[in-house]
Amino acid sequence: QVQLVESGGGLVQVGGSLRLSCAASGSIFSINAMGWYRQAPGKQRELVATILSGGRTNYAASVTGRFTISRDNAKNTVYLQMNSLKPEDTAVYYCYADLRPGAWSRRGDYWGQGIQVTVSS
């Protein structure tokens, strides 16, 4: 069974920084993409950033230049460094991984439980 566990969220003032981490554990054969989505109250879940196993990254326009995604393949962990935070970054952040649990398993998307990030003004 695969688990994704996020950490590092919390309350921060405008202009501050936070670093989110997400560790995938359990039965994992390979991981393709890892990334982060977020959902603010009353809004749909939106992509924040993704990173492929080879290191290629993709960012939402709203976070480009402020957020940096990285991963440690040996630890099956993805990070999101968030700088220059704004009130509109307030949301529940969800980690996801596109992975194959076993050599003969289909690839699928797995999600963390979500972690709150609140930016106060």
Image: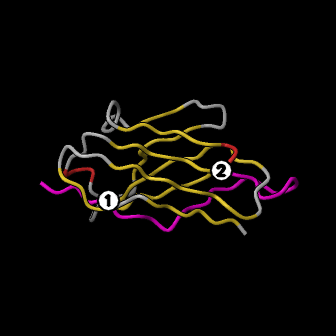
Residue assigned mark 2: 76
- Callout 1, which amino acid? Val
Which quadrant holds residue 64? top left
Magenta-span inclusion, residue 99 = yes
Q: Which mark is residue 117?
A: 1
**Place of residue 79 in the rendered image (x, y in percent of width and height, measured from the top left):** 50, 46
Screen quadrant of the N terminus = bottom right
Mark 2 vs 1: CB contact within 8 A: no
Give the residue drawn at x 35%, y 43%: 82
Above-or-below relation of 18 to 84: below
Q: Which mark is residue 6?
A: none
Report helix, strand or loop for mark 2: loop
Give the residue drawn at x 35%, y 64%: 116
- Callout 2, which amino acid? Asn
Single out the residue that lies furthest toward the left.
121
Screen quadrant of the C terminus = bottom left
**Place of residue 52 in the rendered image (x, y in percent of width and height, measured from the top left):** 61, 37
Above-or-below relation of 16 to 27: above
Q: Is residue 60 left or right of residue 103?
A: left
Give the residue drawn at x 27%, y 50%: 89
Callout 2 environment at 10 Å: few (<14), some (14 to 19), or many (20+)? some
Q: How is the image coloured?
A: secondary structure
**Place of residue 16 in the rendered image (x, y in percent of width and height, measured from the top left):** 24, 46
Magenta-span inclusion, residue 56 = no
Most foreground residue, 7 or 47: 7
Q: Is residue 101 left or right of residue 120?
A: right
Question: Start and end of the magenta stretch?
Answer: 98-121
Above-or-below relation of 118 to 87: below
Most foreground residue, 90 or 25: 25
**Which of the marked residues, 2 or 1, is nearer the chain's N terminus?**
2
